[in-house]
């Protein structure tokens, strides 16, 4: 079966999926993009916002992973690098494939949420 917009919206409705798993948020955003969904439509916007709301932990993991990779071995005694989990690596790849405006939305929301903490 092929998933279309209506099916995706019904599978992710508040009744079926009241909350979004952070690890799946970027996947659902990518699916929305593939299906050509419009964030101006009320129901589609709610799904997008649910994804953005769930994503700060994933975005923080991506940022940490990127920063760790850019820092090299500085501040790492013995020169050993911590290996990123497969989940973090996948999140980094998924994040890198997102359009720039969605990356901005994710980063802005993650920063705002972090400041509230």
Image (spheres, helix red, strand yellow):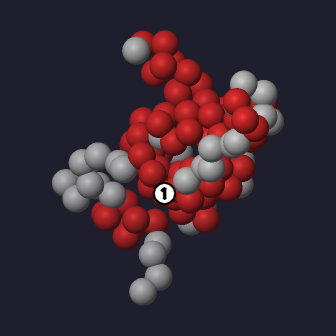
Q: Is residue 4 visible?
A: yes
Q: Nearer the viewer, residue 8 or 87?
A: 87
User: Is residue 75 shown above or below 41?
Assistant: above
> Which x, y percent locates residue 20?
35, 48
Instruction: Single out the residue that lies furthest toward the left.
Output: 15
Instruction: Single out the residue that lies furthest toward the front.
Output: 78
Q: Nearer the viewer, residue 76 or 32?
A: 76
Write the residue at 70% across / 31% down.
76
The residue at which mark 1 appears reads as 28
Q: Secondary structure at mark 1?
A: helix
Q: On the rendered image, what quadrant is the C terminus found in?
A: top left
Write the residue at 59% across / 25% down.
108
> Which x, y percent locates residue 114?
48, 19
| Residue 34 located left or right of residue 42 | right
> Which x, y percent locates residue 86?
56, 59
Q: Nearer the viewer, residue 22 or 101?
A: 22
Instruction: Single out the residue that lies furthest toward the bottom.
Output: 1
Q: On the rendered image, what quadrant is the N terminus found in?
A: bottom left
Q: Is residue 49 visible?
A: no
User: Is residue 58 shown above or below 1?
Assistant: above
């Amino acid at each position: 079966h092929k998933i279309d917009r209506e099916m995706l919206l019904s599978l992710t409705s508040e009744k079926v999926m009241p909350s979004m798993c952070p690890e799946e948020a970027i996947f659902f955003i990518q699916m929305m993009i593939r299906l050509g969904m419009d964030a101006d439509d009320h129901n589609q916007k709610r799904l997008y916002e649910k994804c953005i709301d769930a994503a700060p932990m994933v975005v923080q993991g991506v940022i940490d992973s990127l920063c760790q990779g850019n820092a090299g071995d500085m501040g790492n005694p013995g020169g050993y690098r911590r290996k990123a989990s497969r989940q973090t690596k996948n999140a980094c790849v998924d994040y890198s494939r997102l359009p720039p405006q969605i990356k901005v939305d994710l980063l802005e929301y993650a920063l705002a949420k972090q400041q509230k903490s």
